[in-house]
Amino acid sequence: MRTKKGYTLRPLGTEYILVAEGLEVADSSRMISMNSTAAFLWMEVEGKEFNVQNLVDLLVDNWDISRETAAKDVDVLLKSWKKADVVEE
């Protein structure tokens, strides 16, 4: 899978927002809120091919978290990214 082009991640207080910008994005008025962990993952995979295992590895390597917990968190995150239509498979 891959992040879609046309989105810019911007800090907003303690959160981040993913703003749709550019011609690649149909709805340029949409913004997606992310916490710092989701934003970290987005920045790590932005513009690159990635899979579930890559995201799980990033969580385990950077936080004190079990693989099982990381996998559950990644599942929830990817569902939200897919629902927001910001990744493509």
Image (cartoon, rainbow, N blue to C red):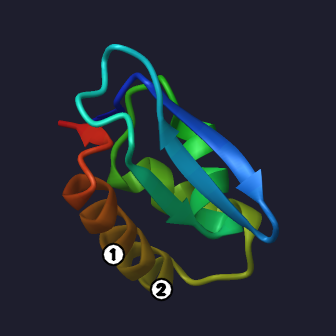
Residue 26, given in percent of the width and then of the height, sits at 23, 29
Which of 50/23 is in front? 23
At x 37%, y 34%, the residue is 28
Task: Decide which of tag 1 and tag 2 comes sooner along the chain.
Answer: 2
Instruction: Report the residue marked by disc 2.
Output: 69
Residue 20 — which label? none
Instruction: Report the residue marked by disc 1.
Output: 76
**Above/below status of 82 relative to 88:** below
**How far apart in space, not on screen, are marks 1 and 2 (Cα)?**
11 Å
Which of 4/53 is in front? 4
Residue 25 as seen in the image, left or right of residue 21: left
Q: Disc 1 vs disc 2: which is toward the camera?
A: 1
Q: Quadrant of residue 89?
A: top left
Q: Secondary structure at mark 1?
A: helix
Residue lying farthest to the front in this orientation: 29
Q: Secondary structure at mark 2?
A: helix
Residue 67, given in percent of the width and then of the height, sits at 49, 77
Q: Residues within 10 Å of mark 2 (few under 14, many from 20)?
A: few
At x 40%, y 22%, the residue is 5
Total labels drawn: 2
- Identity, as a three-letter code, of the amino acid under mark 1: Val
- Identity, as a three-letter code, of the amino acid under mark 2: Thr
Q: Residues within 10 Å of mark 1 (few under 14, many from 20)?
A: few
At x 23%, y 54%, the residue is 82
At x 64%, y 82%, the residue is 65
Residue 7 as seen in the image, left or right of residue 77: right
Residue 26 as seen in the image, left or right of residue 54: left
